[in-house]
Image (spheres, rainbow, N blue to C red):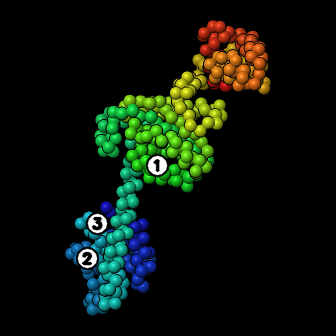
Amino acid sequence: MKLSKSIANLIVKRTMQIIPYSVNVMDENGIIIASGDPARLNQKHTGAILSLRKNQITEIDSDLVKLWNDEVKEGINLPLNYFGNTVGVVGISGNPKEIRQYAQLVKMAAELIMEQSFEIEKDIWKKRYKEDFIKGLLTATLTPEQIKQQSDFWKVKSHQNISVVLLKIKNVTPELLQKLLSYFEYHYPTLLIAVIEIDKLALLKEEIHDKNLFRDISQIFSTLNIQGHIVVGAKVKELCLAHVSYQTAYSTLIHIERIAYKKKLVMFDEYKIPSLFQEFRDSWQAKELLEQFRKLLEQDENHLLLKSLQCYFLSNCDLVHASQKLFIHPNTLRYRLDKIEKITSLSFNKIDEKFILYLGSIWY
């Protein structure tokens, strides 16, 4: 590991809160990269170079200062070690007799700060590398060999049922996003999770995760006052097919947002057709297919007929059930459906034309 300037500055700041002397931190080449005396930055430190060569404490007293023609300053320099490697030097400026009592304390504090910082950097690297792996799975950009290698590295079974859970956060903030990530990291440490977009998180739900996951996600949404959706994609049997589950979840999210669906937890299985046909919706083929249906949109200004049609299909074409949902008499609904047929010239009794009416009801 390399001793960075940010870590060196942290060492200087914290150790100088402990002792009343100026502290310097030098890198592996003996260059001062942090100091209580900013004028000394980027200079070569003779005492540090000696400590690095011998890997031992170097004391510079007034006699040595005179011997070296005042090119050095009094002080004690101690090598900084990390897992047996010398990565830099910490120095305390002052009379060695006066500061000797602080030497080991400063070295211990510096190495502790350094170790903690290195561990944090390592943890950040691991998270970034793991997130890249997850994104590669979701975008289908990894080869089978890469998936095998990385799933072994992260101890993830490549042959198991996987469902991608897409979280959409409408009121996202950096703080809210961090709280949500911290929650999953603490309560579900084995859960594969990645930030797909600033307002979207993707979770790879493996079969080892219990059924309480959805309940817990809904609960944390309520606790953090998160406004958005929890969309569960199709279940796939291989890790390499995670991108399929992700696409189904994403398409379902687009659909429910377009129709302003208010339910928080949404399953792809509930919206298979509108989700799978989502990309087809804006194609020239779809425009041609729905040419007659658009006449309904032009004449139905208050969307009364369209809402009746949607409710009819959502009720599995049960006239009585649909009329009850709409709080109207079945004959009223029957009249509205007849009117839809006249406007569009599409018949509910012809399967292909009924399908066009159904597509129009879910797309508009």
Q: Secondary structure at mark 1?
A: helix
Sequence-wise, the earlier of marks 3 and 1 is 3
Location of residue 173 in the rendering, given as x and y in whole percent from the top left corner: 58, 52
Sequence-wise, the earlier of marks 2 and 1 is 2
In percent of the image, x 60 and y 42: which residue is there? 228
Q: Nearer the viewer, mark 3 or mark 1?
A: 1
Location of residue 133 in the rendering, given as x and y in whole percent from the top left corner: 38, 42
Dot 2 amino acid type: Ser
Location of residue 119 in the rendering, given as x and y in whole percent from the top left corner: 36, 60
From the viewer's side, name the closer residue of 293 and 89: 293
Tag of residue 184: 1
The residue under label 3 is 82
Label 1 CA crowd tier, 10 Å (few <14, some 14–19, many 20+): some
Dot 3 amino acid type: Tyr
Residue 130 appears in the picture as rendered: yes
Vertical placement of 113 versus 361: above or below? below
